Amino acid sequence: MVPTIGRRVRFFAGLGLVGLVMVPLTPPAFRDTAWFVVGLAAFWAILFTVEDLMTPTYGRRGRRGRPSRGEPPAD
Amino acid sequence: MQNVTPGLVAVIAIALAFDFFNGFHDAANSIATIVSTRVLTPVLAVLWAAFFNFIAWLVLGTKVAATIANDVVDPNYLTLAVIFAGLIGAIAWDIITWRLGLPTSSSHALIGGMAGAAVAAAGWQALLSAGFRKIAVFIVLSPIIGLLLSFTLLTGVLWIFHRFHRVDRLNRGFRVGQLFSAAAFSLGHGSNDAQKTMGVILALLIAEGIVPPSSGVPLWVVLSAQTAIAVGTAFGGWRIVHTMGSRITRLQPVQGMAAETAGAATLFFTAANGIPVSTTHTITGAIVGVGSVQRLSAVRWGVAGQVVWAWALTIPGAFAVAWLIYLPFKLF
């Protein structure tokens, strides 16, 4: 059972990072917008991290109940 | 009206032609999702978008026009020749990218063109860094906001309706909803893109001393710019529709509605704050967002990457073309 972090987490973490870089560059009047981007991207990154950690990729059975490769079919 | 010269009339006509091409090139974004989900036929979708483009100024005001007229190039350096060269540079860039089928931003072409001509005329001090900073930051932020909002909206809608078993009835509801979301996006588009032309014409009128620098946008300028973009929309830009609506990701009505609503929300926010953003950037980000809900591999990243390259090249490209066009004026 090896939980892995999926591509969605990296994608939203990347968006959050871009937003974070933009915060100091954004004019003060619009800085809340940049923080909003960081917050929303971080929200999804955290949510998908939790989902990935709770849903192991490699199990005795796949997520849809199919036997994993090499596993004998159930009777 | 003693300051009205044939040159001024000619440059205003070019500005309105730019607005027409903007409608032709960019306004297709307003109808891409509604056509690709087959909610409306292309002809009806174009008419629908053109109408809401036209009435946008009544709803969202003209703050973006003021930003274009006063915050990009120092009004002291704006002359008829600068605005002429800037507009021709932007139009040339738009035609090049349209021929290549790339959904670049007419708005950024205009800003790049105006900047290029102003720098050719008076050097770098002609540019206003505060205005450029605001525009540059939202070049990056607007597609990301569109993406995150559309992703959040679609995920929320799918979560709320996940127990709904009559999928056909649900989809019918979203098809009706998409009519409203497309109208909202067209309002956002009309408020943002038509105002750029209004801003250019206002800058011309200020440069020629016809209106004072603190003046609002005259009604005839508003009406002519809205008409030009609406007519441009009515002529459509089918190559761009194809790229936006189906090449980036295939859309269902619920996805189209989420993308347009997120795009409209982003455009309403930026228009209300006088920030000129690209409607193309925004709707592309929103379409990528709804495609990502399904799975990241549903998005054709090659096309999205091509679009990003086109964005990166737009301001420098239009800047260079306008700079070259202005050079002959320096001889006189």
Image (cartoon, rainbow, N blue to C red):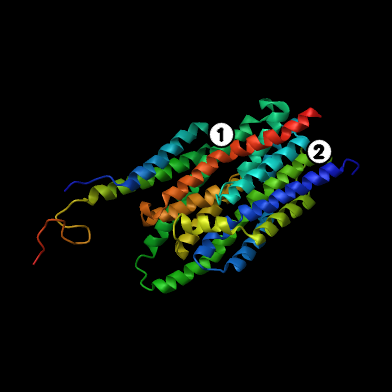
Q: Is residue B72 visible?
A: no
**Location of residue B303 with respect to B250 vertically, above or below:** above
Percent across and percent down for residue B126 are 69, 29
Name the disc covering residue A27, or none.
Answer: 1
Q: Which residue is mark 2?
A: B212
Q: Residues within 10 Å of mark 1 (few under 14, many from 20)?
A: some
**Observer-nearest residue: B234 or B190?**
B234
- On whether disc 2 and disc 1 are found on a single subunit, the reply is no
Q: Is residue A74 left or right of residue B313?
A: left
Query: In the image, residue B110 lies at what x, y percent?
Result: 66, 42
**Chain label for disc 1:** A
Q: Is residue B113 visible?
A: yes
Residue at (52%, 60%) from the top-left corner? Answer: B33
Instruction: Report the amino acid beneath label 2.
Output: Pro
Going by the numbered disc 1, the residue's amino acid type is: Pro
Label 2, label 1: how far apart the Cα atoms are: 28 Å
Residue B300 in picture, x, y percent from top left: 42, 52
- Seen at 22% across and 51% down, the residue is A57
